[in-house]
Amino acid sequence: MKSKLSFSIIAISILATSIVCGCATTSSARLSQQIGESCVFIGEQPAKFAFVPERNAPIVVRNTYLPGTDTTGFVESRDYVIDYANGTVRRTSESRIPNFQKNILYGQDNFDHNKFPGFGNKGYFAFVDYTPKSKFQWPRRKGQTKLLKNARAKLRSGAPVKIVAYGDSITSGGDATKLELIFWRRWADALQKKYPSAAITTVNGATGGDSTVQGLARLQEKVLGAQPDLVLIGFGMNDHNRGGVPIPQFESNLKEMIAKIRAATTAEIVLFSAFPPNPKWTYGTHNMEAYAVATGRVAAETNCAFADVFSNWQTIATRKKPEDLLGNNINHPNDYGHWIYFETLNAMGL
């Protein structure tokens, strides 16, 4: 057991270095490794891996997304048992992995989070590194470089490139445990590694709780005044909620933002969709797919680049519980969820 554990620790260090330096963003790495995939464990019930793991490759299970001084490494047989045939992992009866049955929202249906102070999944996750048994074609790829010619030319020439991230609390970094793990920060870091001579700066123009209505109202202050070269626009989570913004107005608001950005700046624009919130949350209409489709439609009609987060999230979620991916157990991605966003942006090919 000692030799296996020490090999696992080495594997953690290698994989973590790949994430930080951007090396894990290449096509081959994206298809062959899962790093920091998150799970919550309900008693001793099996939790599914997003992809069936390779039996003969090392598996690492720990309590933090990336290894660090506060990381606890969990041990196979003592803390967890893997079913390779079914692609699942479960807690043992004496496991040190947290039991999600103790979460304040466990078993709650149609819940109002305001009635549950201290809600959230922090402290209940286990994060897993493993090699899938079969290479998986993910994320769904549709190159967007034709719509980002100016940004690409500036990156290649070493010119300054200012990126403004605009949207709601997800874009502002909701439930990412470190600033550098926010999805668009990771993407900008990956671009900087790819184009080392470029001078990339980023601006967080997002505001928690905003829909496209507030997005329009804050546009001058948060986006236009910054004179960006590239704008990432991500709304939908608050628009889709009960009492939110109907689809026709949502589309109209996005189009107006795009028109105003183009009138006042030379920036190119990326629209990205959102994922479905917890289906047990009372404030969601649970119609996020329609808002994701609408976002893609607006991108196509206005010749903006589009990052299809919704579909790529749903591919991962096929074998994952919503709680596995939600930092606040409602509508914020955890660090692994931010990685899904990052990989979707990265798949645009810029």
Image: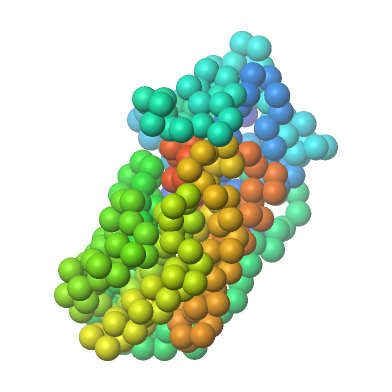
The residue positioned 51% from the left and 39% from the top of the image is 282
Residue 51 image offset from top left, x and y in percent: 70, 47
Q: Is residue 174 left or right of residue 15?
A: left
Q: Quadrant of residue 81?
A: top right
Q: Nearer the viewer, residue 167 or 246?
A: 246
Quarter of the rendering containing residue 4: top right
Looking at the image, residue 192 sits to the left or right of residue 138; the answer is left
Residue positioned 49% across, 72% down in the render = 248
Residue 282 shows in the view: yes
* Image position of 86 (left or right of 302): right
Q: Residue at x 68, y 19 (%)?
A: 44
The image quadrant where one finds the C terminus is bottom left
Q: Is residue 28 visible?
A: no
| Residue 137 image position (x, y, % from top left) | 69, 63
The residue lying furthest to the right in this view is 85
Q: Residue 337, how many percent across, how many down? A: 50, 49
Q: Find the residue positioned furthest to the top.
A: 94
Q: Residue 284 in the image: x percent, y percent?
A: 51, 46
For the image, the number of numbered tags is 0
Q: Is residue 224 shown above or below 10?
A: below
Position of residue 129 relative to residue 265, above or below, is above
Task: Please state which of residues 3 and 169 is positioned toward the viewer in this rendering.
Answer: 169
